[in-house]
Amino acid sequence: MSIDETTAERDRRIRPGRRTRRDRRGPGVRRTFRVRRTFRDRLRRDWPLLLMVAPAALLLLVFHYLPTLGNVIAFQDYNPFLGDDPLDAFLQSEWIGFGNFETLFTDPAFWDAVRNTLTITAFQLVFFFPLPILLAVLLNNVLSARVRGLVQSVVYLPHFFSWVLVVTFFVQMLGGAGLLTQEMRQAGLEPWQVMTNPDTFIVLVTAEAIWKDAGWGAIVFLAALSAIDQNLYEAAAADGAGRWRRFWHITLPGLRPVIILLLIMRLGDALSVGFEQFILQREAVGRQAAEVLDTFVYYQAIVPQQWGLGAAAGLFKAVVGLILILAANSAAHRLGEQGVYAKS
Amino acid sequence: MSVVSARPDRTDPPRRPRRRRQGEARPAWAERPTPIGRLGKGVLLTLLVLAVLGPLWAVLVTSLAARDTINEAGGIVLVPREIDISAYVTIFSGGTVTQAVWVSTLVTVAGTLVSLVLTVLAAYGLSRPDSLAHRPLLFFFLLTFLIFPGLVPSYLVVTGLGLKDSLWSLVLPSAISVFNLVVVRAFFMNVPSELVDSARIDGAGEFRILTLIMLPLSRAVVAVVGLFYAVGYWNAYFNAVLYLDDNDKFPIQRVLQSYLLAGQSPHVTGNVPNLPGVTAYPPSLAIKMAVVVVTVVPALLIYPFVQRHFTKGVLTGAVKG
């Protein structure tokens, strides 16, 4: 330590990275303090903002947080007829610990549903997930802005159709009385039973999901692509990198954060593959193939009113989903990616 | 216009070289696309467009075809021959479908209004990082991304509030989408604070700042978010299955399902209502397709006006949220 070292320099040496008050106070500059407002002051200033947030917060409280808390009936033998209202019934219902979970975990139908759900998720991860990326790259490669715009608006469209409509389209095109059957009959061929075949159901479901959402999923990747610095491409081309090398070394790394982000989100949703799609087609292909966790809850809990059991299945799903998303996110952090939320 | 003319041709002076628009030019360093590549791309894009528009076309044409044409084709008609609107006359002459269209329209309009007002208000309320309780409130909203309430407790809450068999059960539980809220909030936060400050100095209150400064500047994103909400309400199906028992209150998606999917033996989906007329006389194909068209049309009508703002709206949410 030299004798000429100023206090500020010493401070910086001792606590690197932290600026001290002395730092900021240059010669002749009067120190200004931020006025620390009291709670009352801030309330008086901000009450209109709080008032504006209130209705939305109230709705979330009632329709999101209250049901989340309501999951405790998973540990109850909940009987809605016990009291005058649901709250009363909840207070009077008997606590049975993990009884519902025992029933659930010994039910082979539950494990069938879990297996179906996971199989479909895995299948879609392999066959559906990369498609929006490919589509975005393809669209990005189309030079004519007009063609690109046109194709984009067409492929986004099915995202705005309901599942009922999508399934209807598939039934009308591929189903037993649909266009494909009609054409194959006329050509003298034995028609396929695409819509009712449990063995190929997973392919059908994925095809529907692709038809509905692949275009929409490409939006995010398109934006990520347009954010890639064009100079990188130019520099790479000048260095002699061909089309594929540029794709591999610039385009893909440019997409990486988005890909990882979406993968994490998909993983967190691993146990929910969509509700309506399966409930609509469950009867056509049979329970064995089409029962996923969500439909299991509907048919095993809501229809026969076995509330405790259904809540247990729902809680299982939520907890596993939360664990998956946290795990995937911390894995992303470890790989040096940003993930869904920043590490704080 | 031929493909060749896209490249200015130096050997042919009389033809004025076509001016390229921005974004259409191939960067100087890039290789010229190979013919096979161009052809492959063209075929792929055409297939994509056909895969989406084909079913729409088939459904539309069939709904407008006469009974004879349908019989002749053996089902779906692909080539339009005449226009026969009798199917539309039938479904709009009162009865289940007409009723359902009204219900869905009502739910969509009312729901979208409620959702938009609440979302915009909350987004503005959360857009001031130094405001009172800003962090805990924001956390309260964002936490909903991580925790899922589950079907059974939600069902019990909605029925417990007496919303069973009420159209509010289609609106209130899904009224706030935190995703949309985050999108709108991001836009509000991007408005230069000088504008807000000067308005405040001129004596404007928060509501006035919101309506006179924020909203006009964020019209695009509000339109997109409005479309998202509207589409959500128009497409509401599962909530209707859960909470509605009364045939008169069925929205269009539920009716569509019972007309189309329930009729497909062995497609008898569980919990399908016995709609009058459906089981007794299976509706003709033209009528079925007309119902499909009626279900699609509203989305198609709004879509072109909002579509150009999509990227902006979706991305602010996806990337910043």
Image (cartoon, coloured by chain):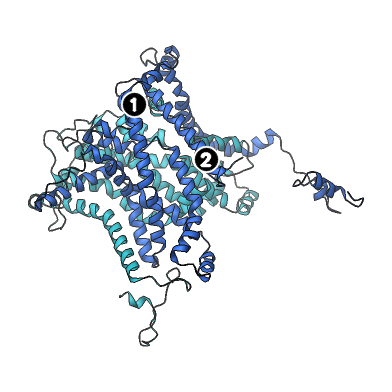
Could you tell whether B4 is left or right of A238 in the image?
left
**Residue B54 located left or right of residue B160:** left
Position of the C terminus of chain A, as image quadrant, is top right
Instruction: Give the image quarter of residue A97.
Output: top left
The label on residue A110 is 1
Q: Colour of chain B?
A: cyan
- Residue B48: tell me if it is visible: yes
Mark nearer the N terminus (2 vs 1) = 1
Amino acid marked by disc 1 = Phe
Which quarter of the picture shows residue B30? Answer: bottom left
Q: Is residue A326 above or below residue B20?
A: above
Q: Position of residue A21 (x, y in %)?
A: 80, 45
Horizontal and vertical percent position of residue A71: 44, 23
Q: Which mark is residue B108?
A: none
Q: In the picture, which chain is blue?
A: A
The residue tagged 2 is A329
For the residue labelled by badge 2, is the local secondary structure a helix, a strand or a loop?
A: helix
The one nearer the camera, A313 or A328, is A328
